[in-house]
């Protein structure tokens, strides 16, 4: 198993009248504990399977394709990249 606690921070910056947005999410601090099976499957460098690190950075572009109204729902395209 894997037990992880994260401190996450983010930024959401809309532009083009709110129809387009840039989104950044960062796991600023991550504390993790893994059992030995999970540690070995992931080839983790921590012998005891516990540690603290900075986490992943997510970068996304959001584009509103169809605006939501009373008659129908909206449609949003999200393109998201993640570091590893």
Image: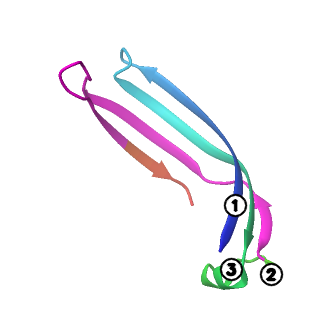
C-alpha distance separating marks 3 and 2: 8 Å
Q: Position of residue 49 (x, y in %)?
A: 76, 75
Q: Main secondary structure of the magenta part?
A: strand
**In this picture, is 15 found above or below 44?**
above
Helix, strand or loop for disc 2: loop
Give the residue number, with chain letter if any, for mark 1. Answer: 4
Which one is in front, 72 or 30? 72
Closer to the N terminus: mark 1 or mark 3?
1
Q: Residue at x 79, y 70 (%)?
A: 50
Closer to the N terminus: mark 1 or mark 2?
1
Closer to the N terminus: mark 3 or mark 2?
3
C-alpha distance separating marks 1 and 2: 17 Å
Q: Residue at x 50, y 35 (%)?
A: 23
Give the residue number, with chain letter if any, for mark 2. Answer: 47
The image quadrant that residue 44 belongs to is bottom right
Give the quarter of the figure containing the C terminus: bottom right
What is the number of the mark on residue 72? none
Q: Position of residue 22 (x, y in %)?
A: 46, 31
Q: Is 15 positioned to the left or the right of 33 in the image?
A: left
**In this picture, is 58 found above or below 48?**
above
Give the residue number, with chain letter if any, for mark 3. Answer: 39
C-alpha distance separating marks 1 and 3: 13 Å
Badge 1 density bin: few <14, some 14–19, many ≥20, Cα 10 Å: few
Q: Are marks 3 and 2 in contact (CB under 8 Å)?
A: no
Q: Position of residue 72 (x, y in %)?
A: 19, 26
Q: Is 73 positioned to the left or the right of 4 in the image?
A: left
Magenta stretch in the rendered image: 49-78
**In this picture, is 83 found above or below 2?**
above
Q: Position of residue 82 (x, y in %)?
A: 51, 53
Q: Residue at x 70, y 65 (%)?
A: 3
């Amino acid at each position: 198993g894997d037990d992880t606690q994260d401190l996450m921070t983010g930024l959401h910056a809309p532009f083009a009248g709110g129809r387009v947005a840039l989104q950044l999410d960062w796991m600023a601090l991550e504390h993790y504990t893994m059992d030995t099976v999970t540690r070995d499957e992931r080839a983790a460098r921590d012998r005891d399977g516990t540690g603290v690190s900075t986490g992943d950075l997510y970068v996304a572009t959001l584009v509103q394709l169809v605006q939501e109204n009373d008659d129908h729902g909206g449609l949003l395209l999200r393109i998201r990249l993640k570091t590893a």
